[in-house]
Image: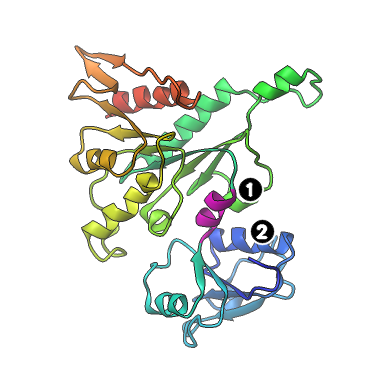
Amino acid sequence: MNKDEKIAVLGFGVEGKDVLNYLKKHGFENITVLDKKNRNELDLKGIDASGIKFITGKDYLKNGLAGFGVIFRSPGFYRYIPEIIKAEKGGSEITSNIKYFLENYKGLSIGVTGTKGKGTTSTLIYEILRQVYPKQSRSAQDKSLKKSNREIYLTGNIGSPPLSILDSTDSNSIVILELSSFQLIDLNNSPNIAVVLNVTSDHMDWHKNQKEYVDAKKNIVRFQNKDDLKVINYDYGTSKSFADTSLSMNYFFSKEKRVQGVYVKDGKIITSIHPAGVHSVTHEVSGFEIGSVDKL
């Protein structure tokens, strides 16, 4: 994406503002914001709107999206509306703040999805990892201490907007992302660790059918490789089917079956995780599994 690219920001909620702030910070100038609200209804507090073109109101898509090199889609916009499809066929790149983040982020990513509970679970993982990797004094001079320090971030649907933290991250960072089907539907990168909760049925007023909903969710694991891993709720058939979607290692949690991962036996929580050769944070992620089983 070059600085002269003609860029559309589709939707000006939290995600659209995140995109605009990032683009402005990095010197992009040919930006158009499109939103169904009237211009005077948009919240521009804290936004540098200088030089930005706004197309707003009920007819904001009347002239389509043709001519834009890149279109940042906010999650509330269905991925396959006619205007987006036509622009894509005409050569436009369709992306989002989450998609752009995952394509440019260099650290360890932990993605969480499910029909219910993903916000609570994401926060739990975040808090566990903050305890495992507490922030050290900025004045610490011991390089060995600095090497062990990892910055932990919470983003996605909760926490900080993803592009607002991207410049602060590096290869030593850990990011936890709460991901909905709206965000997952067109991802082509999966998190290094994917946590799959109870996938049932939801958002049928947005997705065209149940299959599209589940297929969107599966993008959280679809592009993983053999060095990545999945943590899956074994007690839901749809969730369990995610295990065969990619080559990454599978761990499960269950209240009903003995599984490779975490399960309940005689009222006690049992863990059987031996992550040799896997990311060092796997032990900490297993803490989430125990918490999840306890709440099922």
Give the vertical position of 171 relative to 77 (above or below): above
Badges 1 and 2: C-beta atoms under 8 Å apart? yes
Q: Disc 1 residue type? A: Leu
Q: Please provide percent x and percent y for residue 256.
A: 18, 25
- The spot of residue 142 in percent (x, y) is 78, 17
Q: Earlier in the sequence, mark 1 or mark 2?
A: 2
Relative to 84, 127 lies left or right: right
Residue 100 on the magenta span: yes
Q: Is residue 198 visible?
A: no
Viewer-closest of 19 and 193: 193
Give x and y (percent) for residue 100.
Answer: 55, 56
Q: Which residue is mark 1?
A: 166
Q: Main secondary structure of the magenta part?
A: helix
- Residue reaching furthest bottom? 63
Region in magenta: 96-104
Circle 2 residue: 22
Q: Residues within 10 Å of mark 1 (few under 14, many from 20)?
A: some
